[in-house]
Amino acid sequence: MSCPVFPKPSNSKASLLKVFLTKSHSWLDALYEKSYRMKMGEYRLPGRTIFMVNQPELVKKILVTEVENYPKSQLMAEILAPLLGDSIFTTNGEQWRSQRNMLDPAFKQAKVDQVFSLMQSSVDAMSQRLAEKSCAGVFDIDKEMTFVTADIIFRTIMSTPLDEDDARKIFTAFEDFQRQSPKFGLFRLFKLPQALHCFFGQRERQRSAAIIRGAIERIVEPRFGCAVQAQAGCPDSVLALEQHGDILSSLLMSKNEQGKFFDFSEVVDQISMLFLAGHETSASALSWSLYLLATHPEIQQQAAEEAIVAFEQGDASLPVIKKLPLLKDVFKEALRLYPPVGFLSRDCVKDTVMRDKHMTTKDVVMISPWLIHRHHDYWHKPNDFDPHRFAADRNGQGGKSLPPAACYLPFGSGQRVCIGAAFAQQEALLILAAILKDHQLALAEGFTPKPVGRLTIRSKNGMRVRLTPRQSLPRDGTTEQRCSGVSTSSGHVPEETEL
């Protein structure tokens, strides 16, 4: 199959000055050809060295077997602090363990069927919006994926649909936060004076984070007040929380080993983390999935037929979405080629040696799913789109299709594997199936996405597509296409418009 787009790496490693001056808008720009072949590399900065580790055995050592020696990077915590505070995404040690032990039951105790129905209601709303856009011409489906995944988070975690005005403010704020974060990361890596903060986007990042957290605080505040009463034993408040049946209700009633509940700030930290991890990473993965389907029409047709058959007996349900093996493999392959989080950073807290390289407690260890997923030593034709590689492994054919688990890290690995991995895969199948069973998908003429690596890997210029309603067969036997309830001839294609 064809090789999807990815940034062409430079021939040689960039100098420190070039990195500082020209690589601040995308981490991917700092990679060069050898980055995709090496097992371990290094980049020396003032006062510290970044070690890029691509070897599976060492990746497993860092993320699984010796995880206590490689905690989450303090640099990443500083980058995300204005938005996520002290959430499980950034904390370490006992603080992280306590938080994780409180979050895990919150996910398990939330009523699966009710959360699924809330997720489905958001997908239904998306389908209505796309039915209108499918006859309006070309549009940016990346924005729709951002909206629907954020809406799912608001509904399933907080039982609140996402208002379009709030969405616009939140997405603009997060886009600004993403754009400024690589610059701030370089500022911290190069250990520049604090007085230069204003030139590296910190004020803008703080303002953007305040907008996002403010929207979440307004929803959490009344529910938190109810939870305080429920924690004190008020039966009406307990009933009110149980009636929501969402993740927030479960989280508000979770206790740590000492019997302590989350305070308001801690709840907002965790919800902000779930919002970021739950919508931004999923939106990235879905947009790239749609890009791959649009550029591989034969796979798209097979996946669409699979979705139509799976849903022909009625509405979506947990058993129904298990009947989508090809679509699941498409999503897995999209996560391989375009992992939402392209770089996982860890601090080295113990002097050690890896591949004859001496690492000290001042150094940073970087594991890159983006590089590992495209490494020729681990993957057969690593830059090609081939969802069947996962089917071959599932059917016991083995071969060179899939490498060890340490070479596939879209959700991380070890004890810090993404808490919402199953949630993300479930929503992805619902969304992709809903789109494919109703629409044919094609990229806008002449459009090529431009991948950039910031907090997540997104397309800098969006994902411009054209949706065409799938043909249906009316009772008189003539072929129709349906646009928002209006039938048109099967040969009609709407003119391209800007939306």
Image (tube, rainbow, N blue to C red):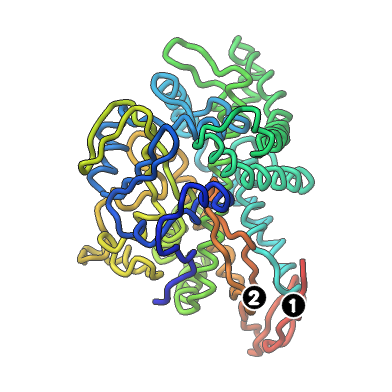
Image position of 187 with respect to 375: above or below: above
Cβ atoms under marks 2 and 1 closer than 8 Å: yes
Image quarter for residue 128?
A: bottom right
Tag 1: amino acid = Glu
Query: Between marks 2 and 1, how big is the CA–CA gap?
Result: 9 Å
Of pointers 2 and 1, the one earlier in the residue sequence: 2
Query: What residue appears at the point 47 percent right and 66 percent down from the top-left corner?
Result: 8
Q: Position of residue 221 (x, y in %)?
A: 70, 24
Q: Quadrant of the C terminus?
A: bottom right
Q: Is residue 323 visible?
A: no
Left or right: residue 207 versus residue 30 is right
Total tally of numbered discs in the picture: 2
Q: Position of residue 115 (x, y in %)?
A: 55, 42
Q: Is residue 61 visible?
A: yes
Q: Position of residue 479 (x, y in %)?
A: 65, 87
Left or right: residue 489 versus residue 440 is right
Image position of 23 with respect to 206: above or below: below
Q: Say which residue label 1 marks.
A: 496
Task: Classify mark 2: helix, strand or loop.
Answer: loop
Task: Classify mark 1: helix, strand or loop.
Answer: loop
Tag 2: amino acid = Ala
Q: Quadrant of the N terminus?
A: bottom left
**Crowd class of label 1 (few under 14; some 14 to 19; many from 20; radius 10 Å):** some
Left or right: residue 42 versus residue 24 is left
Query: What residue appears at the point 60 percent right and 9 percent down from the top-left corner?
Result: 232
Query: What residue appears at the point 36 percent right and 56 percent down from the top-left corner?
Result: 35
Q: Say which residue label 2 marks.
A: 444
